[in-house]
Image: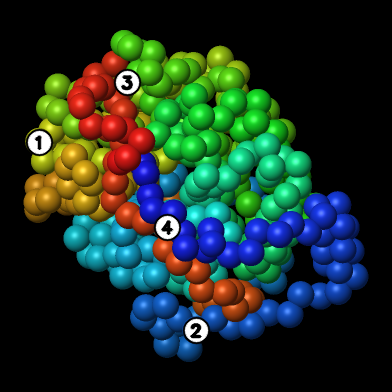
Amino acid sequence: MTHARSARDEQDRRPTPGWLVITIIAAVIGLTTIAVIAVPPLGHDPAPHHRRPAITELTGALPHAPESYIGVYSPEAPDSYAGVTAFKTATGVTPDVAMYYSGWFEGFQTRFAAAAARQGAVPLVQINPDNIKLASIAAGKYDGFLSKYASEVRTYRHPVILSFGHEMNGNWYSWGYRHTSPAAFVAAWRHIVTIFRAIGASNVTWLWTVNIMDTQHGRIPAPGPWWPGSKYVTWVGIDGYYLKSPWTFAPMFGPTIAKVREFTRAPILIAETGAGPIAGQPAKIADLFAGIHTYGLLGLVWFNAHGRLQDWHLASRAAATAFQQGAHAYKLPRLRHLPPRSPEGVSRGGRGLPGNAGKEVAAVGHFREWSSWDVGEL
């Protein structure tokens, strides 16, 4: 998916030496207690007597049982949680993953994350390094920004799912295939994870997100060359969309899942997906949930927004019902360990600009329809 570049890219890019930033911040964290400030609610604020005690310790790894997660992206995020709430109203399903896109130099959206935590959900942040040289990231040029971001995530103290440079095996992003080498991507990914660990942001689940392969033409290659290694990845994400009625889960996602399984047994999340009205939403939603069950995957994140090719919003009562039925068929209760809770214990973060909004790349394995539009402009 392509998304607008954040205006924060225009901020001062003068770097602070990476080793100095990491050393200083890590030392401060080790010697002092981080002050916590309640965040003003974003959306409805539960009555005080409904609030649960704040979490005071960093949360460990998220559960990784199959069929554990149902997430959503709405174009209002991260400015507002209203789109997630509207999705819940439409489907009767409470999302436990709330995704948004973040431009480079955009800080962690603590208000949105706190709203998610109040609803028992985990924020999933897709960090997009638009027009940033990945070699410069690995060399430490942006360590000041990354160290500040890591500190904001650590201070939040609730679980966070972070992904960097998603769909790198596609050619529509500056960090992707034919624009940046896999080696540069791997070095940048490892450097980012190393900084977060030095800062002590142990509440992060690292999601390495790829696009489904184009097995017919080879224009979206297998993702293996971009693999940073098991020490640097918690989960694998795979993105793919249903565009037409004949398309089904196994031919779309199966080849990519098989390739991923050649080098890791990490849990897999369908990290960005949707089905358009042309494909027949109710049937494809049922197929999506069935595929997740068959392959033993973590779950899915539904892209509930307009796209260039189609509108991925749930378009009918039948589609919403199919989504509800699929969610209820999950064999395990989801995120019981993350009940709704108050935002106490969360620091007040700087409010950033939203990542954008609603442009899909219709890369769907060997069913990919290669038409005349420029995928890099989506």
- The reply to whether dot 3 and dot 4 touch (C-beta < 8 Å) is no
Mark 1 highlights which residue? 278
Q: Nearer the viewer, mark 4 or mark 2?
A: 4
| Circle 4: element type | loop
Q: Is residue 150 visible?
A: no
Please indicate whether residue 377 sits to the left or right of residue 342 in the image: left
Q: Residues within 10 Å of mark 4 (few under 14, many from 20)?
A: many
Q: Residues within 10 Å of mark 1 (few under 14, many from 20)?
A: few
Q: Quadrant of residue 275?
A: top left
Residue topped by disc 3 = 365
Q: How are the colours assigned in the image?
A: rainbow
Q: Secondary structure at mark 2?
A: loop
Badge 3 amino acid? Gly
Q: Residues within 10 Å of mark 2 (few under 14, many from 20)?
A: few
Q: In the rendered structure, which disc, 4 or 2, sits on the residue that comes first in sequence?
A: 2
Q: Is residue 145 left or right of residue 243?
A: right
Discs 3/4, front: 4
Mark 2–mark 1 distance (CA, rounded to whole Å): 41 Å
